[in-house]
Image: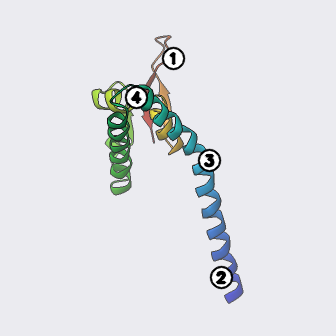
Amino acid sequence: VMASAALAQASAEAEGLELAFEQRRILAPALRRLRAAAAAGGGGGGVELARACATLRAYLLNILQQPLEPKFRQLRTDGAAFAQRVGRLDGGAEVLVACGFQVRLAPSDGSGAISALLL
């Protein structure tokens, strides 16, 4: 019985490590694009990156602290805060997708624009 419990625990830990590395594999390119986009933005690159990261952190912390709250599980990409701080930078929305958000496209306006990110 003890060996079985140890095996189950080891298996769970291995699965957790696998998931962590998979998330890192997906998240790292998005973060690189975000950093590059902020740097390409001119003199305010560091400020833009800090603002984008602070906003992304706030979104994710809200979900961690209140995971069942619907208002934290849907981000409107046309909202001023998202658009100015995160969405205008390449990789910004992609970071959230790497964290599990799903893209909702604008309803049949033909633009293919993202209207929301849902978790």
Q: Residue at x 53, y 42 (%)?
A: 98
| Residue 45 at x, y percent in the picture | 37, 32
Residue highlighted by disc 3: 25
Q: Residue at x 47, y 35 (%)?
A: 34
Q: Earlier in the sequence, mark 2 or mark 4?
A: 2
Give the Cα separation between the discs numbered 2 and 3: 30 Å
Q: Nearer the viewer, residue 50 or 67?
A: 50
Q: Please state which amino acid type lies under the numbered disc 1.
A: Gly
In this rendering, the answer to whether 38 lies above or below 72 is above
Give the Cα separation between the discs numbered 3 and 1: 26 Å
In this rendering, the answer to whether 85 lies above or below 62 is above
- Badge nearest the viewer, 2 or 3: 3
Q: Does the CB distance between marks 2 and 4 fall below 8 Å? A: no
Residue highlighted by disc 4: 87
Q: Does the CB distance between marks 2 and 3 fall below 8 Å? A: no
Tell which residue pokes out farthest to the left in this image: 80
| Residue 78 at x, y percent in the picture | 35, 24
- The numbered mark at residue 102 is none
- Badge nearest the viewer, 3 or 1: 3
Q: Does the CB distance between marks 2 and 1 fall below 8 Å? A: no
- Badge nearest the viewer, 2 or 4: 4
Q: Is residue 1 visible?
A: no
Determine the image quadrant of residue 16.
bottom right
Q: Earlier in the sequence, mark 3 or mark 4?
A: 3
Q: Please state which amino acid type lies under the numbered disc 4.
A: Gly
How busy is the neighbourhood of tag 2: few (under 14 within 10 Å), some, or many (20 plus)?
few
Residue highlighted by disc 2: 5
Asked which secondary structure carries label 4, the reply is helix
Give the Cα separation between the discs numbered 1 and 4: 15 Å
Q: Please state which amino acid type lies under the numbered disc 2.
A: Ala
Residue highlighted by disc 1: 112
- Badge nearest the viewer, 1 or 4: 4
